[in-house]
């Protein structure tokens, strides 16, 4: 959508309200009232014309449909992140609207007109939601809320950051920007709307960090001080809101920098205190960092690895030899990896973010398991087992689903197994056997894909610049072997077809129900995976031999 003529578009006042006296601009502001007050300060004896200087931007097509539904006299504004996204040439995923009153009733009316779902979100705040189903299967949420305050300007000033405190008038295309948010957007600065922004709602501390990373903005120095001062209030926020922000951070850009920022702001003692215990915990070679810095490095590496394996990534254009080799060795699995991440364990949280959560917690119990042997070597026995329990406990406290908790536990519990595979390759030249591959995926299932990606990130975060091409190639070869067996040879190795069930086995061998039956069935499948059993007759013969061994004991 384009508002105004080309001359107005190139005006330095585009998107601002101006006061005109005899056709000349004498003052400006983010609202008509600001422009008028500014003009009265310099031209108090003259009556100016207050005018909005148009600005050009593309609007979501759905807005036109909403405009057609609205009564002509309805005062309503698009607000918040949607306006910010539009002004930064992004497509807003959802749309928030502010109006004087009747948010729920208007939302219900719009839902009926669009043949969409309606939810009364908050009776006290008069907020209703319209859920629009899109053709691609995604959903767009339209939230309509009554002003938080007596006027629109009060509503905007009570918001979190100036970049989110801009309103777009659906009827005349003007902007209301009382806190100069558009100016901060151009300057790429995140600035709180008021000194009490973070004490009013401490979750905004996490949101500021997330949005700074997402938009590549910097946080205003005074705003950072207010964030530090309000950090202790994070503990008073509902765990669901905190969890959602953490997962958005982990799913977004520069998650390691965002996690580091939260630590420096003093948030973790009130959110995930167990993470802080990793700081300063030394590790022996080949580790080049302490446990905490290694964790951050692993997050960085995981981001690079997933980006390097995304569909459409051109490995030949990278200047990083490790990423180039990654694409050459594993590039053929790009579509399968994309599909893996496109299948979330919970519709409200992306699968990718859960893997980053696992990376954040994969060494969380190293401080608890640290030992030093006679040679001075530092070891962390069972840190994977205890870490899985600690991560699962935090996940449950965040009210993650059972499937998410189980996946997280599996990833951390087994995150050392691929390192064990690669150690054997380097020491003995022995790649994982078919039986070892079967056992790996038997224990991990679909989490095995996550384990492959985490192991690659883990070794890069372990050795950093000291990682050799030779070791990296070993890791990539092991990763390739696991992935090609999972996706290209599943019935041969990963999940052989069952040749016998328990009833058949008990009938043929005259066995009673018990543990032995399960053990025999699993041994048969392992030998199928190893290529040693191919038929039902071979399976029965193997089982008879095993039963005879047990009887002989």
Image (spheres, rainbow, N blue to C red):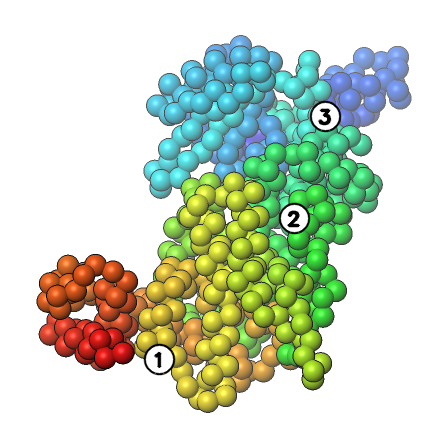
User: Which of disc 2 and disc 3 is earlier in sequence?
Assistant: 3
Tell me: residue 355, above or below residue 71.
Answer: below
Mark-to-mark CA distance, 1 and 2? 40 Å
Mark seen at residue 463: none
Q: Is residue 231 visible?
A: yes
Do the numbered discs 3 and 1 sit on residues whose CB atoms are within 8 Å? no
Q: Nearer the viewer, mark 3 or mark 1?
A: 1
Q: Is residue 5 visible?
A: no
Please name the residue shown 49% across and 77% down the image: 420
Mark seen at residue 433: 1
Q: Which residue is mark 3?
A: 157
Please name the residue shown 74% across and 64% down the image: 280
Q: Which residue is mark 2?
A: 272
Asked which quadrant contains residue 435, the reply is bottom left
Do the numbered discs 3 and 2 sit on residues whose CB atoms are within 8 Å? no
Please name the residue shown 89% across and 21% down the image: 42
Mark-to-mark CA distance, 3 and 2? 31 Å
Q: Nearer the viewer, residue 435 or 322?
A: 435
Answer few, some or many: residues within 10 Å of disc 3's Cα (few below 14, many 20 plus, some between 14 and 19): many
Q: Nearer the viewer, residue 481 or 544?
A: 544
Mark-to-mark CA distance, 3 and 1? 63 Å
Q: Residue furthest bottom?
A: 428
Q: Is label 2 in a helix, a strand or a loop?
A: loop
Q: Where residue 290 appears, x then y in whole percent?
A: 70, 68
Q: Is residue 60 left or right of residue 272?
A: left
Q: Is label 1 in a helix, a strand or a loop?
A: loop
Q: Nearer the viewer, mark 3 or mark 2?
A: 2
Asked which quadrant contains residue 276, the reply is bottom right
Which quadrant holds the C terminus? bottom left
Q: Is residue 548 left or right of residue 359?
A: left
User: Which of disc 2 and disc 1 is earlier in sequence?
Assistant: 2
User: Which of disc 1 and disc 3 is earlier in sequence?
Assistant: 3
């Amino acid at each position: 959508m384009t508002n105004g003529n080309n001359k107005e578009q190139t005006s330095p006042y585009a998107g601002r309200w101006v006061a005109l006296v005899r056709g000349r601009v004498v003052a400006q502001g983010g609202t008509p009232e600001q422009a008028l007050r500014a003009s009265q300060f310099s031209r108090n004896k003259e009556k100016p014309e207050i005018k909005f200087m148009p600005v050009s931007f593309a609007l979501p097509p759905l807005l036109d449909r909403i405009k057609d539904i609205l009564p002509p006299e309805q005062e309503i504004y698009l607000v918040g992140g949607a306006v910010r996204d539009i002004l930064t040439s992004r497509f807003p995923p959802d749309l928030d609207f502010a109006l004087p009153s009747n948010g729920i009733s208007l939302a219900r009316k719009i839902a009926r007109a669009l043949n969409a779902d309606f939810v009364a979100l908050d009776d006290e705040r008069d907020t209703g939601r319209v859920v629009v189903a899109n053709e691609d299967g995604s959903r767009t949420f339209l939230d309509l809320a009554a002003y938080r305050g007596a006027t629109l300007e009060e509503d905007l000033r009570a918001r979190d950051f100036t970049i989110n405190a801009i309103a777009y008038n659906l009827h005349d295309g003007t902007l209301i920007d009382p806190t100069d948010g558009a100016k901060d957007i151009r300057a790429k600065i995140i600035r709180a709307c008021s000194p009490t922004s973070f004490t009013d709602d401490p979750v905004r501390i996490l949101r500021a960090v997330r949005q700074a990373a997402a938009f590549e903005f910097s946080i205003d120095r005074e705003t950072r001080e207010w964030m530090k001062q309000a950090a202790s209030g994070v503990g008073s926020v509902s765990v669901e809101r905190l969890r959602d922000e953490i997962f958005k951070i982990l799913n977004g850009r520069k998650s390691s920098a965002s996690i580091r920022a939260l630590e420096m702001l003093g948030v973790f003692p009130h959110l995930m205190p167990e993470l802080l215990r990793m700081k300063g915990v030394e590790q022996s070679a080949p580790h080049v960092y302490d446990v905490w810095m290694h964790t951050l490095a692993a997050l960085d590496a995981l981001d690079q690895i997933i980006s390097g394996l995304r569909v459409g990534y051109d490995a030949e254009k990278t200047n990083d030899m490790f990423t180039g080799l990654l694409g050459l060795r594993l590039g053929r699995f790009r579509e399968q990896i994309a599909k893996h991440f496109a299948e979330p364990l919970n519709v409200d949280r992306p699968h990718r973010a859960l893997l980053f959560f696992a990376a954040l917690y994969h060494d969380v119990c190293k401080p608890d398991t640290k030992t030093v042997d006679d040679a001075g070597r530092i070891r962390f026995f069972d840190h994977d087992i205890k870490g899985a329990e600690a991560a699962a406990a935090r996940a449950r406290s965040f009210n993650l689903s059972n499937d998410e908790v189980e996946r997280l536990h599996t990833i951390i519990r087994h995150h050392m197994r691929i390192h064990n595979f690669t150690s054997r390759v380097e020491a003995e030249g022995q790649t994982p056997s078919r039986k070892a591959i079967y056992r790996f995926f038997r224990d991990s299932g679909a989490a095995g894909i996550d384990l492959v990606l985490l192991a690659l990130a883990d070794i890069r975060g372990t050795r950093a610049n000291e990682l050799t091409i030779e070791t990296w190639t070993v890791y990539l070869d092991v990763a390739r072997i696991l992935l090609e067996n999972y996706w290209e040879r599943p019935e041969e190795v990963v999940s052989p077809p069952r040749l016998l069930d328990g009833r058949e086995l008990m009938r043929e061998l005259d066995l009673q129900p018990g543990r032995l039956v399960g053990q025999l069935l699993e041994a048969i499948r392992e030998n199928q995976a190893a290529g040693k059993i191919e038929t039902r007759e071979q399976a029965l013969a193997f089982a008879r031999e095993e039963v005879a061994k047990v009887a002989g004991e």
